[in-house]
Amino acid sequence: MVSSTDPRERVTLAAAKLIHKQGFARTTLAEIAVAAKVALGSLYYYFHTKDEIAAAIVAKRVGDLDQMLLKKNTLPDARSRLEALVQVWADDRNIDARYGCPIGSLCYELAKGRGPLSGHAAMPMRTLLNWSEAQFCALGHSQDAATLALHLVSALQGISLVANSLGDAAAITRESSYLQDWIRQL
C-alpha cells in the first residue's frame, strides 16, 4: 500500500514498488492505477505514458540515493562512508535476493535496447559511481579512483543479481563482508 496525499507521488511510489517486483515490461498501467488508488483515466492526467512514469521513478531513485549519500557524508572519513555504502546492500539483502536491487534492476531493464529511457536509466548508476569515486579520491587513490568506484559498484550490483538468481540472501552477506575488508585494506 502506498500512502501519500499527492496523487502523482502515489502513482510514482506504487509504480516503483510494482516495477521492482514484476519488472517494467510486465507491469501494466492498470495495475499501477489500482495500487496507487487512482482511476486509470486519472493516471493519464499525471503521466501521459508509461515511459514518463519510469522517468519519475528514476528521478525518485536518484533523489533517494542523494539523500542516503548525504547521510553517509556525515560519517568521519571516506573509508567509513564506503563501508557504510556496502552495508546498505547487506541490510537490504532479503529484498535484493527476492526481487533484485531496486536501482540496478530498473536501470538494467530501462537501458535494454538503448531506447529513449536509457539516458534516464544511467542516472542512478552515475550517482553511485561519482560518489564512490569521490570517496576513493579522499582515501588518496586519485589515479585509480574511477576504476575502484567501478569495481565497487559492479560488485554490489553483481552480487544483487547473483543473490536474486539463486534466491540466496547470504551471498550478499558474504560479498559485503569481503568488500568491507577490501575497503579497509586500501
Image: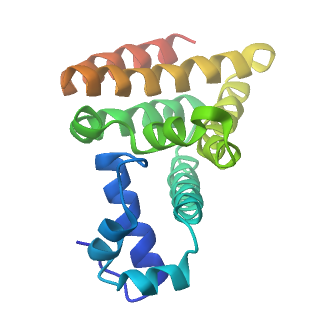
Q: Nearer the viewer, residue 96 or 176?
A: 96
Q: Looking at the figure, which quarter contains the C terminus? A: top right
Q: Nearer the viewer, residue 172 or 54?
A: 54
The x and y percentages for residue 18 are: 32, 57
Above or below, 115 relative to 176: below
Asked if residue 38 lies left or right of residue 169, the reply is right
Above or below, 155 relative to 22: above
The x and y percentages for residue 66 are: 59, 55
Above or below, 141 relative to 7: above
Q: Which of 131 and 5 is in front in this view?
A: 5
The x and y percentages for residue 11 are: 42, 74
Above or below, 109 relative to 39: above
Residue at the image point whose x is 34% and y is 84% from the top? 38
Q: Which of 77 and 8 is in front in this view?
A: 8
Residue at the image point whose x is 74% and y is 14% from the top? 144
Asked if residue 114 lies left or right of residue 86, the reply is right
The answer to which image quadrant residue 174 occupies is top left
Q: Which residue lies furthest to the right in this view?
A: 143
Asked if residue 35 lies left or right of residue 105, the reply is left
The x and y percentages for residue 142 are: 79, 20
Asked if residue 177 lies left or right of residue 61, the reply is left
The image's colour scheme reads rainbow
The answer to which image quadrant residue 156 occupies is top left
Q: Looking at the figure, which quarter contains the N terminus? A: bottom left
Q: How many marks?
A: 0
